[in-house]
Amino acid sequence: MGRRPARCYRYCKNKPYPKSRFCRGVPDAKIHIGQVIMSIRTKLQNKEHVIEALRRAKFKFPGRQKIHISKKWGFTKFNADEFEDMVAEKRLIPDGCGVKYIPSRGPLDKWRALHS
């Protein structure tokens, strides 16, 4: 067997060759532990179908995966049980896939314009 170039010889025993650390086709983790892999928003009547689909999908990912059912309304930061009450009180205004929060403080003219 021939001699390798000088840069390939190991200077640390039981270590990979210098500059060949990332060239072996070893996959790198692209997500962190505890990071959300997939998020789904659906109607309440489709909840069981989505849970079953996610249960089957978690076998396609290595490691232990959990299914977390959020208490929030859609992708907003408001709880589902309070959301419809806040919309009825005009504290939340639908805006695309999210909502605008109208605080109870501020100029009276803006409040009158919304509640007229």
Image (spheres, helix red, strand yellow):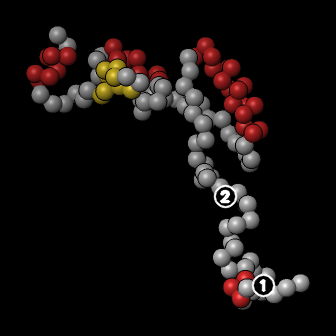
The amino acid at mark 2 is: Asp
- Please tell me which residue is depicted at 20% across the width and 16% down the height of the picture: 114
Residue beneath disc 2 = 28
Up the image or down, 95 lies above or below 27; here it is above
Choose top left, top right, bottom left or bottom right for residue 46.
Answer: top right
Left or right: 101 in relation to 52: left
Residue at 72% x, 25% y: name it.
52
For the question of whether residue 19 can be seen, the reply is yes
Give the mark count. Answer: 2
The percent coordinates of residue 54 (x first, y second) are 69, 31
Quadrant in the picture for the C terminus: top left
Question: Circle 1 is placed at which residue position?
Answer: 4
For label 2, the SS is loop
What x and y, as percent, mark residue 79?
Answer: 45, 28
Residue 20 in the image, given as x and y percentages of width and height:
69, 73
Residue furthest top as drawn: 116
